Image (cartoon, coloured by chain):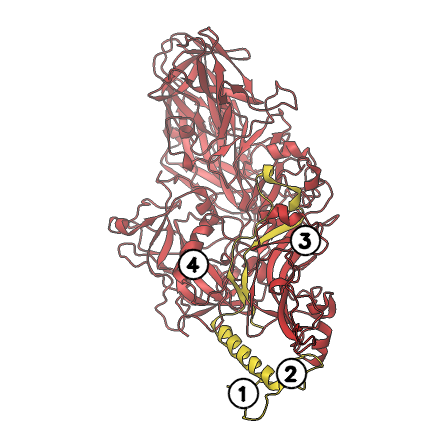
Amino acid sequence: MAKNLGPNVSRVLEQDERSWLNVVFQQKRPPLDSEWNLVQEIQNFKHAQTIRRLTPSGFLTIHDIRTAPENRDDLTSSWVDAIILDNPCAIVNG
Amino acid sequence: MCIRGGTNQFQPNAQNNIWEELSGVETEIAVIGEPSPQVGYREDLVFLEVWQQLIETDDSVPRHGFVQSALENNENDLIDPDLEIETSKRVQLRYRIRWIKGVDFVSYRNGLGHPACFAKGSLGEDNTNYTFTQSPTDPGLWTSGDGSLQSQEDLGTVDGFVYAMPIARIHRRNRVEYSLLNQNGARKSLLSGEKSERPDGLYYDEISSVDVEDLRHQISLDGFDYNALLEENIYSVWDRTQPSELKYSALDENLSGNVLIQVDGISTSDRNGIDDIGRDPDGVKRIFLEAEDSQLHSLSVNSPQLSGGKVYFSAKGHAVLGCEYELWDENVFYISTLEPVVKVYDEVTNTISTISGRTWDNLGEKRTWNYLTGVKNTITYTPTDVSLIENKKLVFEFIFVAREGGGLTGSKGGFNYNILNMLLGYNDKDGKPLDFNLYTDTERVVPLDHYYSSQSATTKGPRVVGSNTDSALARSISRFEEATNPANTFKEVYKAGTMELKYYVLITGSTEDFIESILYERNVFGILSIYNASTFQYLTPSIEKQSGGYKITGLTVNTGDILEYTLLTGGYTFDYVPHTKGIRNIAKMYTFSDSIQMGETEGVMNLNTKNILCDGVLATAGFFDGSQYRHIAFVNSKMVYLDAIEGLGSALIKYTLLDPSAVSGQIVIPFLGYYNPETSDQFYFQYQYIPYSGITQVRLGEDDVQQVRVLKVDDKVMVTTAGTGSESQLVPQELLGMIDTLPLNNKILEYNFFGENVVSPLTGGESSFRRIPGRGLVSTTAGETYLREGQVIDLVLGNSDDETDMHRGVVISSPKLSERGIDFDVAFNHLNQWSAIVLGTGELKGELFLMIITTTSTKYNALESPEDEYLEQKGIYVDDALGNGKEIELKNNLTSIQLTQKLGGKIYGAVDLFPLKYRPLIHSGKHNGD
């Protein structure tokens, strides 16, 4: 299904199941908005495919989830209903 | 798409200063969750939601696309300032961290997929037509929407999808005051500034590390090192630091966490709040477990009754002959097949001897009277020569086996007692505290804060003398003798037990002192040592028992010196085994006395005749004089040294004084002995424990099959020879240099379902647990089960039967082993563990796990046979599995490097999967061999 890029694009070109390698622009023929968008789509798709083949979705950097300190002297009201994630970095193969 | 996290944030509507206080670091994300529930319990899901959004000229541009970021948004620069009209739009990758309350993690291990967990997308509101489903091609990804035009509009995303990944499962407490009937409650808030009433000190609005299960999956672009994962996670299993799913308490289904609370006790009267099946004291039992276990039971007989040269023993209520000794409640016990020891003693000649020639009939688990067949299985003892026992004083030492779950007549009851008292351990008989072991400790520090009765309730605490504060350790009952010896340094073998108190005294000029008979609400049974902390010398003054305490005279001290007394104190000592939910032994301090004549040097005591609740003694008190530890006694109240004491472990004791008694009178010896609680006893306590961390218990149904693919088999096999049947428990000499000796402690053994690290009662040999080179579980028969890399194996739940309705661990194509402790009807010899990194399938798709297979064998040593049998375990295997030991013949040949196991089609043992730290994830098809 073509992406929804809003009402102001002429059309949305799909790259699904087409194995496009390039968009080839022609002389004296200005590129269309849909063609420019397709160029990016092809590049994004290839990049995503590369990562997707390398790994499933998940966290590349991961540290322990921090919770309220066990030392009760360090406990503050800021810890009400709270946890902290430390510098997470994730890959989402969307 | 890649989400780079950080850029601190907090949930909408949160207080703005929270981030400042919590972190202030831009690379961290402070997540503020939903308020805790009023009642009951709740489990919440934290997850990452990601989508692609078309950005218009008037849209905000959150930094990194993190819509909850506390940082200032980026400028919307879509309109060129020279053109002043829109020339293009953008697609931004956006994300938020969401907190969903009330998620079912039993049905949905990752939380996502729960039917009340809806996608929001760009709209920022729950779209109730859109839930998440796991990607069929990406095990770490959940999606909502189908990419259609409708989805694009509904979700407000460019591609018609919203993507999600789980982050954390969080258990929440309710806001009702903690009690035994509401163990998941806490009345106090973090904001109150007051101390929580909960024994673990947690607040209702606090999220502690014990409340969190990390659901994130770690990934790696260059693969994982399976060897490293194996090593790291094996050790974390032994250390009980393995990450685990949150577990539910058996006592309160509202209670879950990584650390749980258990309340327990013994009482004939029911109380509210606890499942205490089989916790009724009867003056005989010392075992109150869900697993079967055995205890020594002494029967003292003066001139035994004989019939036809035999002594008859029967269960209570089943005697037919007038001469029968009715011994046991057969609903609670049966008699072990281990032959009872028969001892004869003479208090005049001070001799104790064991009768060797004998025949025992009908030992073992048999109904005393089989009403169907009319067979009467009375136990009989036939000495080879009747004169050996006729008109003699005897002690029969039976091994009573307490049936699983407290026997056939277990009842349910509970407790409704003061929380603080239960937390500390308490008894209603004399009001004294209990000292019981916690399995997470090898040497437990006893808190004295609540016990110093001479202070007011508000100022209670340990005494402070100069720079010294009184302190106490609870020590082993199984190695009590050593525990009372301050010179010993191998304390790691001790389990907590009777208390050793460091008690400080400031000398004010006198060479005398007085130690009260009750300190910290415990009886003082002896003085183990007196150390002058100012002159660094051990002292050997005269010690005399007096009314109300011990008088010390002849102290070598100066004014201002500080004396450090090491005192033996205590009342009841409980040996508690959390994973079998119960007590496997109880000990108590006794003082037994006898008459002694001037000049005598030795004597014999049958302690069972002095107190029928004591089946045997474990240790005596002693005194350390700076160079030597000696057993002690009191003759006419004055402390004297013993040269030796024989017979520890039984009721018959022979003592020998170091010097002949200078006077005639009474000799008193302090003992730590078994204690069989009476019907009037009421003990209760609570403690925290780390629940078992395997996941198959939760994740497998009765007919489910879980397949895993073996990725990396450990090159070493764990072997313990901590058994009870071996004559030699040493590793062969030729393997010594290759053995990676593991720290042997209770954690390891208890993980392996053993109750404690014991000295073999048969051999006196030390327990051991070693990891030796060897590739495990190699089948030599084609078509049979292998544990080898690349192999896909099936895990199924074992068939439970009425007697063993167990829910922990699985076995491969066979009934499962045991959750609740050793249930073997014969002595086992050793235990083996094979481990591997495996790849999950199905619901566990793509995730790496540590698989541990635990098997046991009945016997091994070079003298017996290198080719050993497996156990037939009563009540554990289903009927058609019994007697099929040949299918799982174990061949352990420790004379070679390889430890191999021949398998049939099945492995009889416990198998479980342990999540790895950060739950590493790979593509299902991306592994060695493919």
Of all chains, the one bearing label 3 is B
- Mark 3 is surrounded, within 10 Å at the Cα level, by few (under 14), some (14 to 19) or many (20 or more) other residues, namely many
Residue B774 rendering spot, x and y as whole percentages: 33, 58
| The C terminus of chain B: image quadrant | bottom left
* Separation (CA) of disc 1 from disc 4: 46 Å
Identify the colour of chain A in the image.
yellow
Residue B749, image x and y in percent? 44, 46
Tag nearer the camera, 3 or 2: 2
Q: Please tell me whether mark 3 or mark 4 is closer to you in this view.
A: 3
Q: Where's residue B190, x and y in %? A: 68, 41
Q: Is residue A27 left or right of residue B456?
A: left
Letter of the chain in red: B
- Residue B33 is labelled as 3
Q: Is residue B556 above or below residue B226?
A: above
Task: Give the residue pinned by disc 2.
Answer: A2
| Residue under the image location 63 percent in, 34 percent down | B422
- Are the residues under badges 1 and 4 in a single subunit? no
Amino acid of disc 4:
Leu
Judged by depth in the image, the label closer to the viewer, 1 or 4, is: 1
Are the residues tagged 3 and 4 within 8 Å (C-beta)? Answer: no
The residue labelled by disc 4 is B229
Q: Nearer the viewer, mark 4 or mark 2?
A: 2
Q: Nearer the viewer, mark 1 or mark 3?
A: 1
Indicate which disc residue A23 carries.
Answer: 1
> Is there a contact, CB below 8 Å, between mark 3 and mark 2?
no
